[in-house]
Image (tube, rainbow, N blue to C red):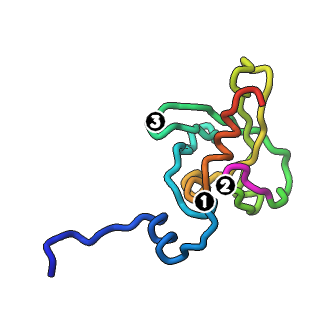
Amino acid sequence: MSDEPPKLYTGREIVLELFPATPERLVPRPSAFVLERDQDGGIAVLDRGGALLIRLAPVARAPGKMPPLCCDLCSWSGPGTELGFLRADVPGSEGRRWRYLTACFDTAACDARRLDDASVARLLALGD
C-alpha cells in the first residue's frame, strides 16, 4: 500500500472523465456566490469572501393551496410548500424599483442544484 492519501476528484473532473461529450453548461464548476437563509425567511447572496451582495426579502403569500413553482435561481420545479416569493431592490434604484423571484426554501439544496452563476448575475445586474 502507498503512504499517499487517496486522490479526491471534483464533480467537474468526474463528469469530464466519464462523460466527455457533456454540454459545457451541464459540467459542474465552482460558484462565485453563496446563498444563505436568514432568520426573517429571506435569502442573503454572498460572494465567496462572505461579503453581502444583495438581500432577498420574503413576500407574504395569499392563504390557500400553492401551485407548483419553479426556482428562478436553480430552475428546480417543486411544490409551492418548498418554494417562496422574494424581492430585492434593483441595484442603483435606491429602493424605487424591485425585482421579484421565486426561490427554494432549502438554500443549501438550491446552491447545489445551480448549474452556473448566470441567474444570480442577472439578479445583481444594474438597472436592467
Mark 1 nearby-residue class (10 Å; few <14, some 14–19, many ≥20): some
Q: Position of residue 92 (x, y in %)?
A: 70, 20
Q: Where does the image place residue 128, in percent across and percent down from the top left?
A: 78, 31
Residue identifier under label 2: 74
**Residue highlighted by disc 1:** 113
What's under tag 3, amino acid-wise? Gly
In what element is the residue under mark 2? loop
CA gap between label 2 and label 1 equals 6 Å
The local secondary structure at tag 1 comes to helix
Q: Pick whichever, 126 or 71, lies toward us.
A: 126
Question: What is the C-alpha distance between the residues marked 2 and 3?
Answer: 20 Å
Q: Is residue 20 above or below residue 49?
A: below
Q: Are marks 2 and 1 in contact (CB under 8 Å)?
A: yes
Residue positioned most to the front:
21
Determine whether 17 is above or below 49 in the image.
below
Q: Earlier in the sequence, mark 2 or mark 3?
A: 3
Q: Is residue 14 left or right of residue 1?
A: right
Q: Mark 3 = which residue? A: 50
**What number is the disc on residue 66?**
none
